Amino acid sequence: MRMTISATNIATFSDRGRQHYRISFENQCENVRVVYWCAEPGSKASGINSECVQTTARPAIAAPLYAVLRTREFQSTYPQGTRIRFVDCADSAFPTSDFRCSPGGQRPR
């Protein structure tokens, strides 16, 4: 899986310090891959909560999950310096909240 990110400044006064993020995933495998991604504020970014926070003591299946056959793109706005994290797993496994892959036998219902 290859992830590319482009970030451009937003020109409006009310969105000063925010950027438009384009997050693209390209599956370079022959099988479907399952991706989890999230945004984490950078050291200078303030005013947003991390979407990458692990909410349980035991890592659980992450959400939301996205299947990527060939390509998939997401767009959003975040403060400058936001870090995008991701994990991808083979179609027989699922990403967990600690950025690992759970075995296929532990599939969510």
Image: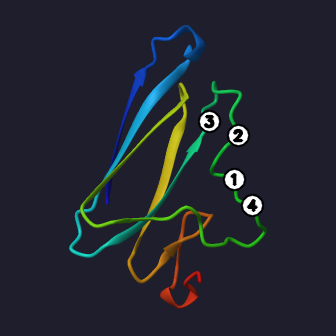
In space, the residues marked 4 and 3 are separated at their CA atoms by: 17 Å
Q: CA distance from mark 2 to mark 1?
A: 9 Å
Residue at the extreme bottom: 105
| Pointer 1 local density, CA inside 10 Å: few below 14, some 14–19, many at least 20 | few
Q: Which residue is mark 4?
A: 55
Image quarter in which the C terminus is found: bottom right
- Residue 41 tag number: 3
**Residue to which mark 1 is pinned:** 53
User: Residue 72 vs residue 81: left or right?
Assistant: left
Quadrant (top left/top right/bottom left/bottom right) for the N terminus: bottom left
**Secondary element at tag 2:** loop
Which sits earlier in the primary sequence, circle 2 or circle 4? 2
Type of amino acid under label 2: Asn
Residue 49: mark: 2
Out of 18 and 53, give the one closest to the viewer.
18
Kindly indicate whether the residue at mark 2 contacts the one at mark 3 (C-beta within 8 angstroms): yes
The numbered mark, 3 or 2, whose residue comes first in the sequence reads: 3
- Which residue is at a point 64% across and 30% down the rendered structure image? 43
Q: Amino acid at mark 3?
A: Pro
Q: Measure the C-alpha gap from mark 1 to mark 3.
A: 11 Å
Q: Amino acid at mark 4?
A: Thr
Q: Position of residue 9 (x, y in %)?
A: 44, 18
